[in-house]
Image (cartoon, rainbow, N blue to C red):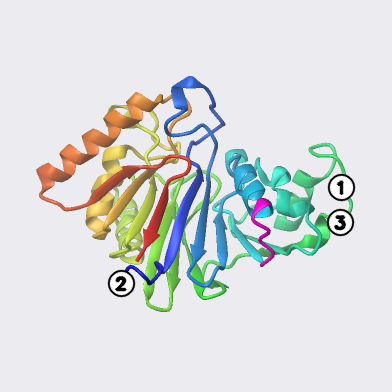
Amino acid sequence: MSASVPPRARIRFWGTRGTCPSPGPRTVRYGGNTPCVEVRARDGEIVILDAGSGIRALGAHLVSTAHDGPLHLFLTHRHSDHVLGLAHFAPLFTDGQRIRICCGDGEATSLHAFTTSILTPPMFPYVDGVATRLDISEWDDCVAHSAGGMAVHRHVARHPGEAAVFRLDDKTGPLMAYAPDNELSYHRETEAIIAWRRGLARFLHRVPILVHDATYEEREVSRHIGWGHSSNIEATRFALECEARTLVLFHHHPDRDDDAVERMLDDCRTFVEREGGSLRLLAAWEGLSLAAD
């Protein structure tokens, strides 16, 4: 690609930690905020993936740069670490701003009622006009949602609460995939799990950038079966099966310090070398920016 041509999209990480925020000196390198990822297309359209505590800094950035276009927020599910930043998202309090929120996790409570509960007492003080800036829609799994020139597709994840895996495409094909809470379950090889994993691999085949749950070390997985998360090695194995070009380890455990995340990344590189793969490996940190070409 010519140096004068911008990438198809740019992906920026605003929150990379899972379960709960974990700020402090042990998490400075990779960050302590919970999931939020910005995908900005070449035409300037913005898709936001999850509204964890990282969305607060994204909102401040959007306001400071006077972004006034529509915003598309897609929630993988409604667990607190993925929505706790929503009420602190500055564009919600900006006159004229439109924010579209989509989620399809099948909970009994409607998405409208759920979102309203986050933004009103007793969870948050009443602020006039916030609700008028929201376009809230439930999500049928079979329907891709458009966001400007991008399309967001949804596949069921293995996680309590019916979470989702997202794949974002533009007119030339897949841009990236996002699987922050997903139990790959290589330690439980039932027919149903194998079939689900093969279907997910087809859904994500040759995706350029795969952002995947790597909450656990391999030695920890057997103690957390059914918790809805994967190990760093499982994520790497799956990325190789998908033929992804880049794997970004994500949803770091809140008790995992920066040095431990580095060791997990090194273990993944050793695994890829042993398998003879060419997968590029990164561990997500707050501020990381990747070009999707």
- Which element carries disc 3, helix, strand or loop? loop
Q: Determine which residue is flagged by label 3.
A: 129
The percent coordinates of residue 116 (x first, y second) are: 78, 51
Residue 2, disc: 2
C-alpha gap between disc 3 and disc 2: 45 Å
Q: Quadrant of the N terminus?
A: bottom left
Q: Who's the residue at 45% across and 36% down the image?
A: 227
Where's residue 106, x and y in %? 61, 56
- In magenta stretch: residue 235: no
Q: Which residue is mark 1?
A: 127
Mark earlier in primary sequence (3, 2): 2
If the image is split into quadrants, where does the C terminus sit?
A: bottom left
Nearer the N terminus, badge 1 or badge 2? 2
Q: Position of residue 154 (x, y in %)?
A: 49, 63
Q: Please name the residue shown 44% across and 31% down the image.
A: 253
Q: Secondary structure at mark 2?
A: loop
Does the magenta run of residues contain 67? yes
Tell me whether the residue at label 1 lies in contact with that at label 3, contact meaning CB atoms closer than 8 angstroms: yes
Spatial CA span between label 1 and label 2: 47 Å
Left or right: where 163 falls relative to 218: right
- Can residue 156 be seen here? no
Q: Nearer the viewer, residue 235 or 224?
A: 235
- Local packing at callout 3 (Cα closer than 10 Å; few below 14, some 14-19, many 20+) is few
